[in-house]
Amino acid sequence: MDFRQLRYFVALYEEGHVGRAAERLCLSQPALSQQIRQLEQKLDVNLFQRTGKKLLPTLAAQTLYSHALVLLDGLERAQEAMRAFRGQSPRHLAVGVLQTVNASIVPLLLERLRQAQPQLIVRIYELSGIEIERRLLTGNLDVGIGFLPPRQPGLHSLPLYEDELQLVIAPQHPLKEFKKVSLAQAAELPMLLLGEEFRVRQIWQEQLALLGRRPQVRAELNHMAGILDSLPHSDLATVLPGRARQLHANQGLLWKPLSEPRVPLKVGLVFRDAQRQQATLELLRSLLDGLSAPAREAGWPLA
């Protein structure tokens, strides 16, 4: 058993699908399957069982997975320590980003990273908040960018900027003349929303729950761009971070601030090990200086 096979095993265990795991590893499906078979032969156990199209881990796989995470994390720490000892910067950086903040951060981040550290290979993954936190805990991401605070114990955060949730409607919507829309008014509207796994949706539901309301969901899509493309052709509304407006202004949609109360959003870096990742965090914060300045002026501490 070697570390390469352990990485392959962890990817397959977490994805539950050979195709998705192979894509994540930048590996062909036959090559991945062969490596898993070799690992099973070395260990003399079956790690996965097929049930229809699903790939289910055995009890042996569950046990191996818990040990594999510790081993791979230890290997990564050792490699980073040796690079630091030699005065070298990390060569790879895996960042998970919420799609609702992706477009307002990633282009700027990629360009500044390229200029600051041209040797660095950056991998950006657009994920839900739940998936970002899960991958941070399993060591498959170095840093996440999402809404604060993180939900999982063991994760920490560093604020970048503030935003707020806004109501988005088509130009012909009955509320088109309103400058602001109260939370109570918005609660009555039929909605086209992101799925429940998305943090924006969760925040919206939490706010309505404080009023004793539930969202009036008429349709769901799993991508923000699809929602914005659909709104002009319907009488539905949605809620999204206000910062997304500057990136999707060409649809002619109307973005209305929510009031009574406002729904503030804090966006920042999410990570697992502040001490080990200090250099990376400082680099990212400095590169996103235009976004993070308001947070620093507010005096927010490292959470």
Image (tube, rainbow, N blue to C red):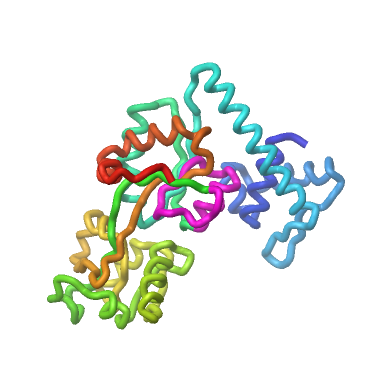
Horizontal placement of 182 versus 222: left or right? left
User: Above or below — where is 173 with respect to 284?
Assistant: below
Question: Could you say which is closer to the camera, residue 157 or residue 30?
Answer: 157
Tell me residue 38's x, y (percent).
Answer: 79, 42
Can residue 77 be seen here? yes
In the picture as drawn, the residue positioned furthest to the top comes out as 86
Horizontal placement of 39 versus 235: left or right? right
- At horizontal 20% and vertical 68% (from top left) the residue drawn is 256
Tell me residue 233's x, y (percent).
Answer: 26, 75
Question: Could you say which is closer to the camera, residue 109 or residue 154?
Answer: 154
Question: Could you say which is closer to the camera, residue 135 or residue 121?
Answer: 135
Please say whether residue 138 is one of the residues in the magenta stretch.
yes
Question: Could you say which is closer to the camera, residue 151 or residue 112?
Answer: 151
- At horizontal 30% and vertical 81% (from top left) the residue drawn is 189
User: Above or below — where is 43 with respect to 204?
Assistant: above
Number of callouts in the render? 0
Please say whether residue 33 is one of the residues in the magenta stretch.
no
- At horizontal 38% and vertical 75% (from top left) the residue drawn is 210
Can residue 217 be seen here? no
Horizontal placement of 76 versus 42: left or right? left
Q: Which quadrant holds the N terminus?
A: top right
| Span colored in magenta | 130-154
Tell me residue 237's x, y (percent).
Answer: 29, 74
Give residue 26's quadrant in the image.
Answer: top right
In the picture as drawn, the residue positioned furthest to the right comes out as 44
